[in-house]
Image: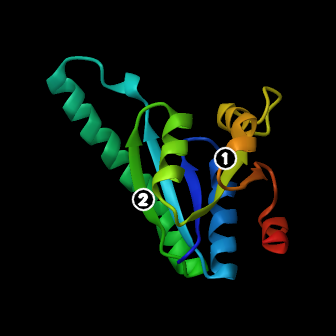
Amino acid sequence: MMRKFLVVLDDSRECLNAMRFAAMRASHTGGGVEILSIIPPDEFNHWIGVGNVMREETRERIHAHFEVFAKWMRDRQGVDPELVIREGEAVPEILAQIDEDPEIGVLVLGAGTDRKGPGPLVSQLTRASGTLPIPITIVPGDLSKEKLEAIT
């Protein structure tokens, strides 16, 4: 069974280093990368018709965003990532994905670099980490590419 690194795709800067780390680790260990994008529920509670159009547009944006990372992973790391899109609140959806896919071996999160702290995902998931079925790797948002290569 292949071990997959689960990374969350969002618009944060730190997401980039988490992607890099996951791809490098997967490449070095013969593992895979699963990229999870979560659409928050409040994006669509307008009228039904508008909601469906927005949902499609959101999915298209996610696919385009994913393709940028996927191309880099394939070209540079020889890793072909898979994309999973879920709708709901971030933390419960991440936990549900880990629960539903037994191949996921590590959750990789990027930590924000501003004074407000590492970001809500890191804060919430580290609180839950004692009961998670897999380890979490937290990648600092301002680690250089060289440093990342050295540690993966």
Q: Amino acid at mark 2?
A: Leu
Please report the residue visible at 37 percent of the width from the left and 54 percent of the height from the top.
Answer: 63
Find numbered disc 1 in the image and state the secondary structure of the residue it sits on: loop
Please report the residue visible at 63 percent of the width from the left and 74 percent of the height from the top.
Answer: 26
Which residue sits furthest left? Answer: 49
In the image, taking residue 44 as reference, residue 68 lies left or right, namely right
Single out the mark in the foreground, 1 or 2. Answer: 1
Please report the residue visible at 65 percent of the width from the left and 52 percent of the height from the top.
Answer: 133
Q: Is residue 140 above or below residue 30?
A: above
Mark 1–mark 2 Cα distance, whole angstroms, equals: 22 Å
Q: Residues within 10 Å of mark 1 (few under 14, many from 20)?
A: some
Q: Is residue 70 visible?
A: yes
In the image, taking residue 136 as reference, residue 47 lies left or right, namely left
Q: Position of residue 14 (x, y in %)?
A: 68, 47
Residue marked by disc 1: 132
Q: Quadrant of the C terminus?
A: bottom right
Q: Position of residue 84 (x, y in %)?
A: 41, 54
Figure quadrant of residue 78: bottom right
Q: Position of residue 146 (x, y in %)?
A: 82, 69
> Answer yes or no: do the residues labelled 1 and 2 have beta carbons within 8 Å?
no
Q: Amino acid at mark 1?
A: Leu
Q: Of residues 89 and 75, which is closer to you in this image?
A: 89
Q: Is residue 131 above or below residue 16?
A: above
Please report the residue visible at 48 percent of the width from the left and 75 percent of the height from the top.
Answer: 80
Residue marked by disc 2: 83
In the image, taking residue 116 as reference, residue 29 lies left or right, namely left
Which residue sits furthest top? Answer: 46
In the image, taking residue 91 as reference, residue 129 lies left or right, namely right
Q: Residues within 10 Å of mark 2 (few under 14, many from 20)?
A: some
Q: Position of residue 77 (x, y in %)?
A: 60, 78
